Amino acid sequence: MGRLPAAALPGIITMKRNFGMSSRQLALWPLLLTIALLLGGCSRNDPQVALEAATQRLQENIEAKNTSAVMDQLHGEFLARQSLDREWARRTMTLLFLRHRNVRVIALSKSSWVDPVVSSRGHSEAQIALTGAEGLIPDSARHYAVRLEWWLEDGEWKLGRLDWE
């Protein structure tokens, strides 16, 4: 095997490689990695994100007049106003959807949170306007303050309780 001459060794030892990044750019990597890890905590598996998505999906399903999709979001033990069950919800939606060609749920304000004590419970509160119309202009509009209690079942938020004023 060929040996390198002794005179070549100092050049090899002091040889610098340029990796295309300055020391300043390398110093930013820990910061960028930290930001990426924090944002990674906001994934779809985050119960808060999933809860907010469930409330949005409920609004979209009502506006699409998709009774079966709304019913799929209701827990088996769903109650509205402490006594109105799933069958009442189905009948009420059917009547609303037959009465109005266009149904809109306008969230004036909304807030959702996962219960800090019982993580399988979530809550949403909203000020909404529920409108119905035969054409473009609503011929019916009502304002409600609604409170929803969601129950996490098999990794999916289901609406367990509904109340309004």
Image (cartoon, rainbow, N blue to C red):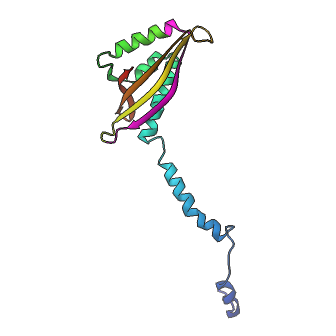
State the image coordinates of residue 41 (x, y, percent, origin top left).
47, 48
In the image, residue 143 lies in the stretch drawn in magenta: no
Q: How many marks?
A: 0
Q: Is residue 114 above or below residue 38?
A: above
Q: Residue furthest bottom?
A: 6
Per the picture, the main secondary structure of the magenta-coloured stretch is: strand
The region drawn magenta spans 97-116
Q: Is residue 161 left or right of residue 38?
A: left
In the image, residue 115 lies in the stretch drawn in magenta: yes
Viewer-closest of 69 and 58: 58
State the image coordinates of residue 122 (x, y, percent, origin top left).
37, 34
Residue at the spot 35% in from the left edge and 16% down from the top edge:
86
Viewer-closest of 119 and 126: 126
Residue at the spot 38% in from the left edge and 32% down from the top edge:
123
Q: Is residue 5 left or right of residue 27?
A: right
State the image coordinates of residue 24 (x, y, percent, origin top left).
64, 68
Residue at the spot 45% in from the left edge and 33% down from the top edge:
111
Q: Is residue 15 above or below residue 56?
A: below
Rendered image quadrant of residue 32: bottom right
